[in-house]
Amino acid sequence: MAGASDWFSIGSTVLCKTCHEQEIEGEVLAFDPQTKMLILKCPSSSGRPSLNDVHIVNLSLVSNVQVIREVSPTTSEPPQSLNLQRLNTRVRNQVEEKKRLVMALQAGVSPEGQKLFIAISKTIQDITWNGANIVVFNNVTIRPPYKVDNVHGNTESGAYRHVKKVVEKHIKDTAQAQQQREQQQQQTQKGGELQ
């Protein structure tokens, strides 16, 4: 590993050449000298300027390291502190979501019901299971086999109409996806027959 120093300052720009001849250039986010692990923030491979790629580089597997732009450790800002309350909220929400999915599995809910539950839960947080029934907003119930006709509640309420639209969209999207899969399978089979 030619040219690597014992320490990289956060904010410096570094160019690494891996043992696979891949070049990675980015801003140093972190460096651990004990494990020789370097974390680089690079422009997004998707091309979207609002996003970044993050590479974790094991310097033991790097053939060359060049510091393109050095930042003095005394002039760099201290790392931003983590918003622990926000992180704890995210963890709590994810745990609750996983518990709801486990409840569905334990209730013996069909895969169609589980997929509908997941689709609804992406936009509506007030959703739960009552046995095999999906309950949304505490007053709209979707019973097996989870079709539009199986949505029950006060038909005059906005919640009922909204949930019914979500179910319709989910069924339409699922049918389109299934149709695309079937077309791809047919094309694959036709391609195999031609060979």
Image (cartoon, grey):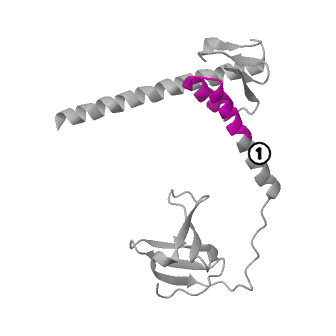
Would you place residue 144 above or below residue 70 in this image? above
Q: Position of residue 44 (x, y in %)?
A: 54, 61
Say which quarter of the image contains residue 53: bottom right
Q: Nearer the viewer, residue 156 or 152?
A: 152
Q: Residue at x 82, y 54 (%)?
A: 85
Identify the magenta region. Answer: 96-123
Magenta-colored stretch includes residue 122: yes
Is disc 1 placed on a helix, strand or loop? Answer: helix
Residue 86 rendering spot, x and y as whole percentages? 79, 53
Q: Nearer the viewer, residue 94 or 177?
A: 94
- Kind of residue at badge 1: Arg
- Please identify the quarter of the rendering in which residue 142 is found: top right
Measuring 51% from the left and 56% from the top, which residue is drawn there? Answer: 46
Query: What quarter of the picture does the C terminus occupy?
Result: top left
Q: Could you tell me which residue is drawn at 54 percent across and 66 percent down?
A: 55
Q: Residue 31 in the image: x percent, y percent?
A: 62, 76
List the residue tagged with mark 1.
92
Residue 70 relative to residue 124: left or right: left
**Residue neighbourhood size for the residue with mark 1, other residues' Cα within 10 Å, grouped as few (<14), some (14–19), many (≥20):** few
In the rendering, at what x and y percent does residue 117 appear? 64, 28
Main SS of residues in magenta: helix
